[in-house]
């Protein structure tokens, strides 16, 4: 270990050391350090299949051991101070450009269920907005706030909130400003706000226009609004199915793509082999599948 300590990264050195120690330990006498478990947890969440394969080669913690480790980490609805504390230490080592980030929030449906938690002595499953309080309604949706670096490819969820139905636009406004303040307090510089085009989001951003796509100017730096590009692409494709647009002196219609597809699929050597029937006649519940939209309005089809 002394010979190779200057040749390999610290994490690799720790892994080699733990494998040497565990290789002579009995099956029920293995003891994994916290660092061992954190490394194992990272591999497990990248790919469970890969983790199970590596466990046949290396001495790794069992999946149940990793689950027990996570049980001690409570993540209640709201913005998590532990995350912001860790971010503050990380931000201290960043350059100015690395601190620029985007705030991304999205809502998704979840299964409705209420249960009693003995750890917190409370009923879980109700609508919960963290510091803004809870209600008596059963939650069926969750809103997640994440941040992502604009210069470097890093991302981090910072909080989530349980809601019954679509989140109220006034509450969403309060939560967004709260997130901005917390990010600025730890040294990050939010420059962009990204979300999809659900009605409540548009209501929340009703003051944002094409000529002035600014969410707020009350902070030292302006924060701009960008609708989620994948959703914009799917909306363009779905809009063309119902309407004709004028552009460059001509009409833009999905009928032209349909005619091309009918001609192309009868050829032995296809010009656009990715186009299939489901691209033209989209199955139920697949209107927002991004790959079906991008392949229809792609450069290949246009050419």
Image: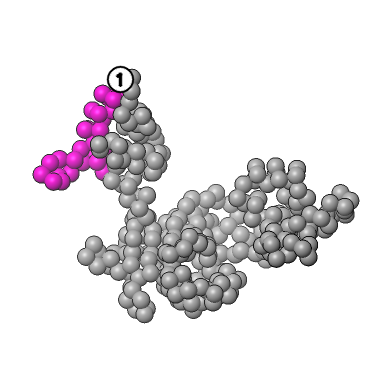
Query: Image quarter for residue 302?
Result: top left
Name the outermost residue toward the left: 249
Judge left or right: residue 162 versus residue 216. Answer: right
Tell me if residue 145 can be seen.
no
Judge left or right: residue 148 versus residue 50. Answer: left
The structure residue drawn at horizontal position 68% and vertical position 46%, both measured from the top left corner, is: 51
* Residue behind mark 1: 266
Judge left or right: residue 127 versus residue 51. Answer: left
Measured as percent of width and height from the top left, residue 20 is found at: 81, 55
Query: Image quarter for residue 275?
Result: top left
The verdict on residue 3 being magenta is no
Measured as percent of width and height from the top left, residue 16 is found at: 75, 57
The structure residue drawn at horizontal position 21% and vertical position 33%, both measured from the top left corner, is: 256
Compared with 120, 141 (above or below) is above
Along the line of sight, which residue is nearer the eye, 100 or 226?
Answer: 100
Compared with 56, 143 (above or below) is below
Magenta stretch bounds: 238-265
The structure residue drawn at horizontal position 44% and vertical position 57%, both measured from the top left corner, is: 106
């Amino acid at each position: 270990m002394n010979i190779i300590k200057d040749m390999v990264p610290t994490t690799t050195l720790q892994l080699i050391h733990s494998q040497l120690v565990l290789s002579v330990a009995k099956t029920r006498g293995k003891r994994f350090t916290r660092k061992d478990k954190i490394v194992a947890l990272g591999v497990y969440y990248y790919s469970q299949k890969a983790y199970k394969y590596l466990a046949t080669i290396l001495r790794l913690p069992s999946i149940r051991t990793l689950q027990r480790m996570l049980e001690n980490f409570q993540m209640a609805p709201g913005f998590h101070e532990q995350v912001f504390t860790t971010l503050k230490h990380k931000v201290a080592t960043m350059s100015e450009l690395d601190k620029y980030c985007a705030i991304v929030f999205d809502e998704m449906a979840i299964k409705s269920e209420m249960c009693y938690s003995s750890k917190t002595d409370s009923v879980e499953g109700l609508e919960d907005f963290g510091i803004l309080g809870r209600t008596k309604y059963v939650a069926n949706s969750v809103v997640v706030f994440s941040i992502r670096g604009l210069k470097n490819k890093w991302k981090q969820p910072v909080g989530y909130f349980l809601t019954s139905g679509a989140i109220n636009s006034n509450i969403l406004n309060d939560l967004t400003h709260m997130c901005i303040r917390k990010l600025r307090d730890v040294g990050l510089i939010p420059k962009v706000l990204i979300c999809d085009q659900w009605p409540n989001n548009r209501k929340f951003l009703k003051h944002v226009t094409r000529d002035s796509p600014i969410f707020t100017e009350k902070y030292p730096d302006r924060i701009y609004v960008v609708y989620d590009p994948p959703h914009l692409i799917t909306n363009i494709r779905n809009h063309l199915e119902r309407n004709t647009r004028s552009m460059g002196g001509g009409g833009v219609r999905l009928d032209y793509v349909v005619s091309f597809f009918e001609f192309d699929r009868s050829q032995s050597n296809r010009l656009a082999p990715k186009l299939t029937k489901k691209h033209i006649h989209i199955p139920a519940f697949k209107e927002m599948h991004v790959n079906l939209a991008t392949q229809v309005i792609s450069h290949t089809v246009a050419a």
